Image (cartoon, rainbow, N blue to C red):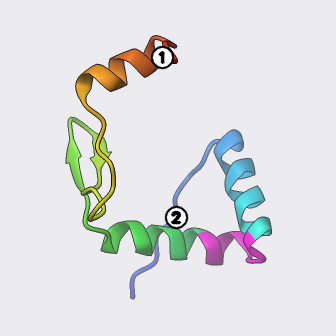
Amino acid sequence: MPRATINLDEALKARLTDLANQAGQGIDEFVEAFLRRVADADIRFDRGVPMFPPRLGAPVLTLEEVDRLANGDEG
C-alpha cells in the first residue's frame, strides 16, 4: 500500500498525541486507524463541512432549537 506524509501544525500534533496516549497507542498507529475510520464512514461534505447521517432514533434539533441554544437561551 502506498504511504504518505501528512504535515500537522504543533497544536494539532499535540492534541492527536494526547488522544493517542489516552487510547494507549502510538501516534502513527492512532492517526492511521482514525483516518481509516473516517475514510470508511458514511460521510459527505457540504461546503467543506463533514456531514454524518443521523443515527436511527437519534433526536434531531429544529432550526429554532439550534438558534435558541446558540444564543444561550436555556428555556
Residue drawn at (73%, 72%) of the image: 23
Residue drawn at (52%, 13%) of the image: 72
Residue 38 on the magenta span: no
Residue drawn at (46%, 68%) of the image: 35
Quarter of the N terminus within the rendering = bottom left
Neighbour tally class for label 1: few under 14, some 14-19, many 20 plus, Cα within 10 Å = few
In the image, is 64 to the left or to the right of 5?
Answer: left
For label 1, the residue is 75
Q: Quarter-wise, where is residue 37 in the image?
A: bottom left
Q: Relative to the observer, which residue lies in front, 45 or 69?
A: 69
The secondary structure that dominates the magenta segment is helix
Neighbour tally class for label 2: few under 14, some 14-19, many 20 plus, Cα within 10 Å = few
Residue drawn at (48%, 12%) of the image: 73
In the image, is 40 to the left or to the right of 10?
Answer: left
Q: Report the residue that reaches farthest toward the front.
A: 75
Q: Amino acid at mark 1?
A: Gly
Q: Quarter-wise, where is residue 19 in the image?
A: bottom right
Q: Which mark is residue 5?
A: 2
Mark 1 or 2, nearer chain start: 2
Q: Relative to the observer, which residue lies in front, 34 or 73?
A: 73
In the image, is 34 to the left or to the right of 22?
Answer: left
Q: Which mark is residue 50?
A: none
Q: Residue 27: percent from the left, percent from the top?
A: 70, 69
Q: Amino acid at mark 2?
A: Thr
Q: Which region is colored magenta?
A: 23-30
Secondary structure of residue under mark 2: loop
Q: Is residue 10 above or below residue 42?
A: above
